[in-house]
Each structure stands twice: as C-alpha cells, then as structure tokens.
Amino acid sequence: VPNQLHVVMGASGKPAQEVLSAPLLSEGIPLYKRRGGGGTVLLGPHCVVLTVHARAAHLYHNLRYFSAINRALMLCLEPILGCPLEERGISDIACAGKKIVGSSIFRRKYFLLYQASILIDLPIETIQGVLAHPPKEPDYRQNRSHRDFLTCLRELGYRSSATQCAETLQAAFGSVLPKQLELADV
C-alpha cells in the first residue's frame, strides 16, 4: 500500500498526453515511469499494488501470463467481494463493466514482472484532476470519463482497509498463483 500519492506512466507514456501537469505540480505529486506497458495511474493509500516476479516458459505469450495472474487475483478477490469479476481489455479486471484493477508486464527473456494496482477506494476528484483522458483506451471504456469508467472495492461493498486487503491477498495469492502459472506454461 503506497503511503503517498504518485503518478506512474507506462514505458511509452508521454507526460504531455497523459497527465495534467499544472495540477500535478501544484499538488506536489511525483511522476514516475515504469518499465512495463500500460496506462498512467494514480497510486497511493487508496490502492494495493501487487507485484509478481516469475519465470515464464514462453517468450511471447504475455497475454497468457496476464490472464493466468489475473485469474489468480480474481479467485482471491471474488470471495471477499461477493460479485463476479471479469477480464476486460488487454489486462484489466472489471466488475459490471467498470475497471477495478489495471496491470502491466515487463519482460526479460524468460522472466516477467507483473504489476497491478487494485482500487480499494476511489479518490475520483484527484484522479480526474491530475490524469488526462488516456490517448489509448480499451474498447470497453467507450470514451467514458474516469468517474464513469472506474470503480473500487469500497463501492462494491468491501469495508476493510487497503492494508487489510493486502494482507488477505498476501495470505491467499501464493497458494492460488502457482496452479494458474502452470496452466499458462503448458
């Protein structure tokens, strides 16, 4: 759980297209780039960041690995939410057509680094205040604003803290993930 707000862009992100620079500067929110792909996100105490570093048997099957790790995450989240989750776009997890998890992968030959941000709470005013509408979007976004496209675990009925969610995921994820990665490596 990040202890402060910061904006993170994907490897090909361009600040002029993806962030609102003046509000970002006035709020004192740092801007970083990650090695993996994906869109620009606002991270902070309102979310849980999940990182998986794993050996991958296949060089070019990133979609297969996105799906495997996302399935493991969905298997851990669905029981605490009580609602069905679905994979949408390239690597999002959504509930009823609204995004709750975004992820990215960075590859080094047979090793991959998967990172996901799970929205526990939704500081929508801050998100809309510092992030521009993305220049590329998944088909299911349908040009919706951040407010209309995103949701969070809190809006889905989850009442525990981000820290508690991180602890719950940490306890369950390790036992679910190996089977899903094994299926991806076939």
Image (cartoon, grey):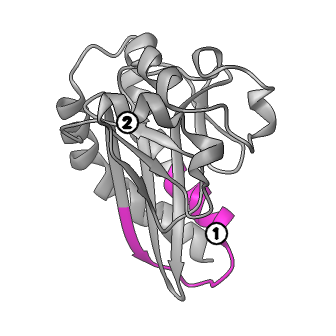
Q: Which mark is residue 62?
A: 1
Q: Quadrant of the C terminus?
A: bottom right
Residue 144: % across, % down: 73, 21
Q: Residues within 10 Å of mark 2 (few under 14, many from 20)?
A: few
| Mark with earlier residue (1, 2) | 2
In the image: residue 179, left or right of residue 40: left
The answer to which image quadrant residue 68 occupies is: bottom right
Q: Is residue 174 above or below residue 22?
A: below
Q: Residue at x 42, y 37 (%)?
A: 42
Residue 126: % across, % down: 42, 21
Q: Which residues are magenta?
A: 52-70
Q: Amino acid at mark 2?
A: Leu
- Residue 141 magenta-highlighted: no
What residue did someone put label 2 on? 25
Residue 172: % across, % down: 28, 46
Q: Residue at x 39, y 28 (%)?
A: 79
Q: Residue at x 68, y 23 (%)?
A: 97
Q: Nearer the viewer, mark 1 or mark 2?
A: 2
Query: Which one is nearer the viewer's eye here, 31 or 61?
Result: 31
Q: Quadrant of the N terminus?
A: top left
For numbered disc 2, what is the local secondary structure?
Answer: helix
- Residue 58 magenta-highlighted: yes
Q: Amino acid at mark 1?
A: Asn
Residue 143: % across, % down: 78, 25
Q: Residue at x 39, y 10 (%)?
A: 157
